[in-house]
Image: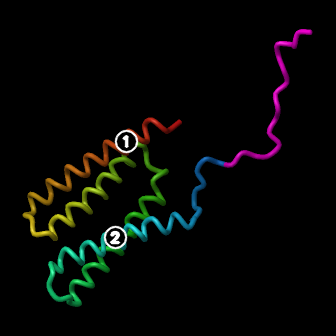
Amino acid sequence: MATHATMPMRRRTHARTPARQEHRHTALAWMVPLVLGVILGFWAFFINRDGGATTNGQIWLGVVSGVGFAVLCFLLARFRWSLPRELRAAAFGVLTGGAVGYLSSLNGRSVLMSGFIGLVVGAGMLVTMFYAYYTREE
């Protein structure tokens, strides 16, 4: 008894969910930028402290740096799907390179050396994110 060549397929009974849900705030969408901002803020505080006594200026430097970076991370995560693949990768590169260059400048390096370190790290992030988006997008 041979089976017919065109077997009926099962049909979906429920609607498909979209791959990306715009304008939805999950706990992860808030927590990742918050944790990254706290890490950058503490890092900036400890670099500027340099083993000495803690001052209000150092605390404010850490708080403002962390809040600024967290806001930029949240905004990038929120609007990244509205950007084309190349701009999205460049935005991640700029954010990462800027953060590393800023922390490097707090460590006492010159502006040129901090800029060079930020440029190298940002270029690496740009290439990495472009590869990730290029190989995984539809």
Of all residues, the one furthest to the top in this rendering is 1
Numbered disc 1: secondary structure: helix
Q: Is residue 62 above or below residue 13?
A: below
Residue at 15% across, 67% down:
105
- Residue 130, disc: 1
Q: Residue furthest right?
A: 1
Tell me if residue 134 comes above or below residue 75 in the rendering: above
Q: Is residue 4 magenta?
A: yes
Rate crowding at label 1 as few (under 14), some (14 to 19) or many (20 or more) other CA atoms within 10 Å: many
Q: Main secondary structure of the magenta part?
A: loop
Instruction: Report the amino acid beneath label 1.
Output: Phe
Q: Quadrant of the N terminus?
A: top right
Q: Is residue 82 left or right of residue 70?
A: right
State the residue position of label 2: 39
Check residue 105 in the rendering and tell me which mark sits there, or answer none: none
Q: Residue at x 45, y 59 (%)?
A: 77
Of pointers 2 and 1, the one earlier in the residue sequence: 2
**Residue at 15% from the left image edge and 78% from the top image edge:** 50
Rendered location of residue 101, percent (x, y): 20, 61
| Percent of width and height locating residue 94 | 29, 55
Over which residues does the magenta segment extend?
Answer: 1-17
